[in-house]
Amino acid sequence: TQLLEQSPQFLSIQEGENLTVYCNSSSVFSSLQWYRQEPGEGPVLLVTVVTGGEVKKLKRLTFQFGDARKDSSLHITAAQPGDTGLYLCAGSNDYKLSFGAGTTVTVRA
Amino acid sequence: NAGVTQTPKFQVLKTGQSMTLQCAQDMNHEYMSWYRQDPGMGLRLIHYSVGAGITDQGEVPNGYNVSRSTTEDFPLRLLSAAPSQTSVYFCASSYLAGARDTQYFGPGTRLTVL
């Protein structure tokens, strides 16, 4: 059973469209991270959110941490083919980091 | 500065064989960890270390051993390989443990057990 549930599992959209990926848990996390992974490579950190209700923006990517620190979302505006990849959320309260199963995003040109 | 390196990149084993996956980092990070990634499962923590000489179990430790004799190296040993251990293995390191710090991942080792 995954501690962090991500939805949807797969997402395919046209270039220029918007998309949102969700990360939900029944547990409270002190902080939560989002990573992107490309085929054949390790995950690369996109953002860390710490405070409940926090919103962070990274160019066309907007990350939100839920008020109760149990859920998070990643919104991409005007998606581009370069946004294609596996998006993973991860949370921890101690030394152990737990990952969601990931959302595979494909942006078609 | 090479970051996190892993060797080998690919490996095929027969059931019952043993091997060691190597992981090294040159960033003087205290925290290192091993994950396995299977389709539809995300990354699952196998073992982790908060410093030289200190290791602990993660979510899926059975069948794997680790040691941390130096800050730089954190090898993962498969004692008797089983087909269920077919997976992609990632090593990661960070200054601090957990999700408050950036985890730097290696390129992965793709292991197939026949």
Image (cartoon, coloured by chain):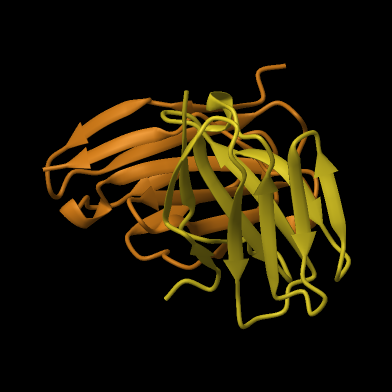
* Vertical position of residue A109 compared to residue A92: above or below: above
Residue B62: quarter of image: bottom left
The yellow-coloured chain is labelled: A
Apparent side of residue B37 relative to residue A95 in the rendered image (left or right): left
Q: Quadrant of the N terminus of chain A?
A: bottom left
Apparent side of residue A109 relative to residue A35 in the rendered image (left or right): left
Q: Is residue A51 visible?
A: yes
* Vertical position of residue A18 compared to residue A1: above or below: above
Residue drawn at the location 47% of the way across and 23% of the way down: A109
> Residue B41: percent from the left, percent from the top?
39, 59
Residue drawn at the location 21% of the way across and 39% of the way down: B112
Residue drawn at the location 59% of the way across and 62% of the way down: A22
Q: Is residue B52 visible?
A: no
> Residue A64: percent from the left, percent from the top?
77, 59
The shade of chain B is: orange
Residue B88: quarter of image: top left
> Residue B83: percent from the left, percent from the top?
17, 52
* Vertical position of residue A56 compared to residue A80: above or below: below
Residue drawn at the location 42% of the way across and 64% of the way down: B61
> Residue B2: percent from the left, percent from the top?
65, 18
Q: Nearer the viewer, residue B106 or B57?
A: B106
Q: Specify the farthest residue to the bottom.
A: A26
